[in-house]
Amino acid sequence: MRFVDEFRDAEKATALAAQIAALCSPGRQYKFMEVCGGHTHTIYKHGLEDYLPEAITLVHGPGCPVCVIPMGRVDDAIHLAEQPDVIMTSFGDMLRVPGGRGSFLDSKARGADIRMVYSPLDALKIARQNPDKHVVFMAIGFETTAPSTAMTVLRAAADGVENFSIFCNHVTIIPAIKAILDSPDLRLDAFIGPGHVSTVIGCRPYEFIASGYGKPVVVAGFEPLDILQSIYMIMRQLASARCEIEDQYTRVVPWDGNPKALRVISEVMELRPYFEWRGLGFISHSALRMRQEYARFDAERLFQLPGVRVADPKACQCGEVLKGVLKPWECKVFGTACTPETPIGTCMVSSEGACAAYYNFGRFSRERVREATRT
Amino acid sequence: MSNDREQQVLDRIDRARRRKARVTDERITLAHGAGGKATHTLIEAVFLDAFDNPLLAPLEDQAVFSVGGARLAFTTDSYVVAPLFFPGGDIGDLAVNGTVNDLAMSGARPVYLSAGFILEEGFPVADLTRVVTSMAAAARAAGVQIVTGDTKVVQRGHGDGCYINTAGVGVLDRPVTLGASRARPGDVVLVSGPIGDHGVTIMLARGELDLESDITSATAPLAGLVSALLDAAPGDGVRCLRDATRGGVATILNEVARAADVAVVIDEASVPVRAEVRGASEILGLDPLYLACEGRLVAVVAPDVVDAALAALRGHPLGAGAAVIGQVKADPPTLVLLKTEFGGTRIVDLLIGDPLPRIC
């Protein structure tokens, strides 16, 4: 398949892996964080770690939009969904995320009208088709998905759709990365930068990571060769004592991002003073809410929400996993009390979550599997 | 050191997974019907617990037993597909072929079917006629007769137009006993053609995706294909056959790995997937291995009959795209592993519920 197969070429991967291995300093250990959940998914789905030398460890970051939604917000969303004459719409991987009283799927089983959509525009379409109902779109995601939410609001406003609103949970990536950088138990050598987010925000916002914290960043694409190449680019920086922001994903990510998308976001949304992140706690200026001008499309203003903060379960160590302090299997409840069927923490819910990716794709001993896959 | 600790955790997980399944949900969710972990848990914890008997216990697609000297296969399946009509088929031929194939996978010759209809008030008679005509044609093509039936009508809003249940009886003319637990290390895994066609067809036919493609469901009766395979590999060379419907090839292989306490290692590059199916899966973030198939079987065969089995499948019009996709190994037991096209390795586990598209 064109535009896919050339980024999954095993021969090229083998050559790149050899170059990466050659750049390792003897005795040195390297830890790189891939910020984005999409990267985590690619790494596990293609078994990319098989190409990395033992000296390089990949640490899975906080960039899974589903994983960072706190339980209280899920409860608020379910509260909205269970209001009379409300249709709740949501992306598919939000359906299983547990709040304090179950997930969307459980609420649906109790009778709520919750529908999976592929785009906020689909939610707007449902609103048009159901004029006697109020349709809420559960908006989640980083700067990647925020523009499409904002565009949908503008469309609804232009067309005078009145039975449609947004439950806005959009978050911004930079404050989360900063929170990780400021964490006292941080031990990272570099970052693999999020590709999709960067198509919107560009590469410039990462400059403080190199200049202020001395960590290289390489913004990477989502095919396995993209990630392998970005690791090679990081290794080259480290080997030559450089510390820069580099763009591996130039075929998609412009250095200055997408000003039009940024304009649309700021037309409709503004920064919240603070927002709670699952596992990371409250981070200031880390999320978006609807502007006053679009209050009529803001579910938080249209409906009374409980807004109760629900503490993460005590046993859950999602925060440590999201910060890269713990590997998924090092969490106390991993794989026994917390599994993809019965997730305690959000890292276990989305296929992009570090724990779910490890559980679903990587839960095996490398040596035994090397034996089993030898032909 | 870290490897040892990781292995301890993995062993603990393995023990947890072998524990008896328990349903923790208070209500049925759609996940319970998706064919993945939730479905297995429900079957094992609720149905198997209550109905427990040696014929049901292996959880094959059909029960095989003797009556008056004849070996019979018996099965049932319900069809709730939406939309009712889709490119390449409709709920009618699906309801016939699905049950015919569940019988055929035991090596049986399907003979008689029942048909139960649950119709929703307001359902167009013209649509019902179309469904029934297509069932009759499918039955003729499969060489079975629909000999008994039932009709119920539920109030508007209590059903999705038309649900169909079919049960079927088949006769085992050959002395074969097939079953997932018979797989053993060294065996080889085959599929009879490209996978995922049906799953993608249905998703596109729902019209939610604004994607267009020429892909059609491959629904077909497979008794003839099975017969050709068993003729080519007599004795116990064929260990197990499954039609890869709900949950796809990945789910079937997990069932084999668990039932036989073996590892199944799949080579991604050799799994046949049409370009359109791969494309749609890429866009939606789905894995073709989990997509529902119709008219496709997975066979586990002994190493010495692989060539004969593959030739027999390929020599049949419904198996022209057959391929060897993997091998059965002893270790690590109960796991399905995938050698990825990229050159890495990963697990292919049971899905929890429906395959849900990723957001970005």
Image (cartoon, grey):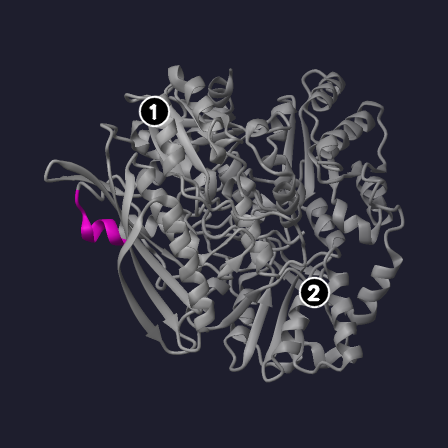
At x 80% / y 49%, what residue is drawn? Answer: A198
Instruction: Give, as a three-letter code, the residue at label 1.
Output: Asp
Tell me, yes or no, if residue A285 can be seen here. no
Identify the chain of the residue marked 1, using the numbered disc in the image.
B
Give the dominant element type of the magenta stretch: helix, strand or loop: helix
At x 22% / y 27%, what residue is drawn? Answer: B175
Dot 2, how many residues are within 10 Å of its Cα: few (below 14), some (14-19), or many (20+)?
A: some
- Tell me if residue B15 comes above or below residue B125 in the rendering: above
Identify the chain of the residue marked 2, using the numbered disc in the image.
A
Compare residues A315 and B295 and report the one nearer the observer.
B295
Residue B339 position, x and y percent, is 55, 27
- Frontmost of labels 2 and 1 is 1
Q: Give the residue at the far left of this rendering.
A: B68
| Residue bearing mark 2 | A274
Q: How many marks?
A: 2
Position of B171 with respect to B280 (left or right) is left
- Tell me if residue B97 comes above or below residue A7 in the rendering: below
| Residue bearing mark 1 | B231
At x 31% / y 21%, what residue is drawn? Answer: B234
Q: Which secondary structure, mark 1?
A: helix
Instruction: Give, as a three-letter code, the residue at label 2.
Output: Tyr
Magenta-colored span: B46-53
Compare residues A86 and A320 and report the one nearer the observer.
A86
Q: Is residue B281 magenta?
A: no
Residue A130 position, x and y percent, is 60, 79
Quadrant of the rendered image containing residue A264: bottom right
- Tell me if residue A27 comes above or below residue B223 in the rendering: above
Q: Distance between the residues labelled 2 and 1?
A: 70 Å
Position of A261 with respect to B137 (left or right) is right
Compare residues B300 and B118 and report the one nearer the observer.
B118
At x 56% / y 51%, what residue is drawn? Answer: B201
